Every structure is written in structure tokens, then in C-alpha cells.
Amino acid sequence: MNILITGASGSVGTGAAEVLSANHRIRLSDAVPINSPHPFWSADVREPNSLLEATEGVEVIIHTPAFHGVHLGQRTEQEFYDLNVTGTFHMFQAAVRNRVRRVVWLSSMSIYGSSFYSYTKKIGEQLCQFYHENHGIEIIMLRPADFTPYRDIFHYGERMLHGGVDRRDIIQAVECAVSCKTPFGAYHIVRQDPFDEQDVRVYSEFPLEVWEKAYPGSKDFITKQGFRIPQQIQVTDLSKERQELGFSPRYNFGTFMKEYDSNTT
């Protein structure tokens, strides 16, 4: 299968290229040069027709370019709109022109928020729906939780106590989205902790005990490292993601502790 990865120098783009190249023909595009064995097109998606040549003969586009929540305050609303919305529009225009069959579009769990970043992702998902309904493009929208680069292993560990998801799970979701049978859908790409409703009810009284139940050894580990713990937890239902997308997260606070132990012993 011929796959184009846009924004290929980013975290998702580099990981997707590595994983998918084993079974697919990969080509890359980005506004910055990339040193890669795969064919590369220099393209700034904010410019009209920038992806026309790169999408010729392509069956699937994995579209990743975006400014994210971490860029709020660093980038203007105009910059967010130009890249996240206009860039998506130009990608779809090229997809229609070259009859691309499927688009995997990186949305965000921030779609439920109220920031300008959230707003651009809401518009992006509306564009996805329009191009599916009016042009027949298969579209899989992935809504990852926070997987931005972490400062150190402890920053990563604390993130896995809160709303974070492991980058490797994001890459797994992209791989699933390329070949799943579902023609259209939006999916939550989040971590799944083994909490139940009883855990949620008692959490405010016994938070460390709930984490210990989920991941034996975590109570002492959290206390020793001085990690902040979330004020509340929830039971996550990923049955739709498993059934339609084939996505099953593999990483959580328990796997973090195991990796930490293996790296320090």
C-alpha cells in the first residue's frame, strides 16, 4: 500500500514511518527537510496545492501537522488556524484531486475543551465528516490524550498517573487505522487503567490504596518519588476502539514501574 505521512518529522510521523515501512511503501512530506530513506516531498500544507504531487498514486494519507495545546501562548490564533484548519483543508483538496481512498487524521482529546486549539480540532473533525459524506473518502479520526515529549522518566511516570498516554500506543492506533475495515469513525486513544466503579466511589478517601490495587507496589513507589496523584479517576470504556479499530493500549503506570526497575537494576 502507498502511504503518505504528512508532518513526517514529528513524533507521530517518525514513529508511523518506522512501523509501517515493514509492510507498506512509505513516502514523507514536511515543511522542513528530513533525512530519511523514504521518498520525501517538501510541502507546507498551509499553501494551496502543496500536496498535489506528493499524493499522486497514494492510497492512504496519515495527516499529522498541527500546533498543539502546548503551543498556546506561543503561537497566535491565526497560526493555529492556518496550520490546523487550512492545512487540513488543503490536504483534503489534494486527496480528492488524486482520489486518495483513506485519510487517518490526528485529532485530540482536547476536542472536549474550550481553548482555541480545541476549536481548531472541532473544525477539523467537521471537515473530515464533510469529505467523507460528500467525496466518499474513508476517514479515521484518532483522538489521543497527552503524549507530548516528557522532560525525564519521572515526568513521564507522573503523566501516566494523570491524563497521559504512551507514544507507542499512539503509533499502534495509527497502524490500526491504516488497515481497519471501518470506513469512518472517531476514536479515543487513551490509556486504560483497571479501575472499576467501586474504585471511583472510594477514591477520594483512599487514593493510594486504589492505585495499589490497580498496580501492586505503586503506593510505595508514588510516595517515594513524591508524585502528584490525580484528584479523581474514571472507568474508561474502549470497547468501540477495540471492536472497530482494533486498538488495545499496552502501556500504563504499571508498565512504567516495570520499565523503571529494569533500567535501574
Image (cartoon, rainbow, N blue to C red):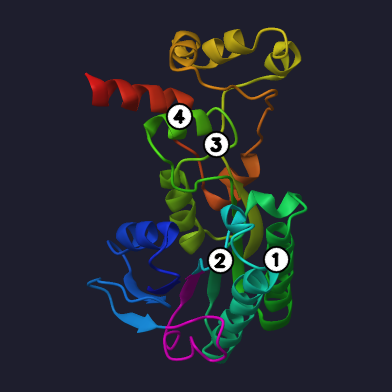
Distance from disc 2 to disc 3, alpha carbons, whole Å, reads 22 Å
Q: Which residue is mark 2?
A: 66
Distance from disc 4 to disc 1, alpha carbons, whole Å, reads 29 Å
Q: Amino acid at mark 1?
A: Thr
Decide which of tag 4 and tag 1 comes sooner along the chain.
Answer: 1
Mark 3, secondary structure of its residue: loop
Q: Which mark is residue 157?
A: 4
Q: Amino acid at mark 2?
A: Ala
Distance from disc 3 to disc 1, alpha carbons, whole Å, reads 24 Å
The residue under the point 44% across, 83% down is: 43
Tell me which segment is drawn in magenta: 43-62
Q: Which mark is residue 191?
A: 3
**Residue farthest along the front direction in this orientation:** 74
Q: Quadrant of residue 38?
A: bottom left
214 relative to 40, above or below: above
Mark 2, secondary structure of its residue: loop
Distance from disc 1 to disc 2, alpha carbons, whole Å, reads 9 Å
Decide which of tag 4 and tag 2 comes sooner along the chain.
Answer: 2
**In the shown orientation, is residue 237 left or right of residue 161?**
right
Q: Quadrant of residue 96?
A: bottom right
Out of 257 and 184, give the one closest to the viewer. Answer: 257
Q: Could you tell me if the residues under marks 1 and 2 are in contact, i.e. CB atoms within 8 Å? A: yes
Quadrant that contains the N terminus? bottom left
Mark 4, secondary structure of its residue: helix
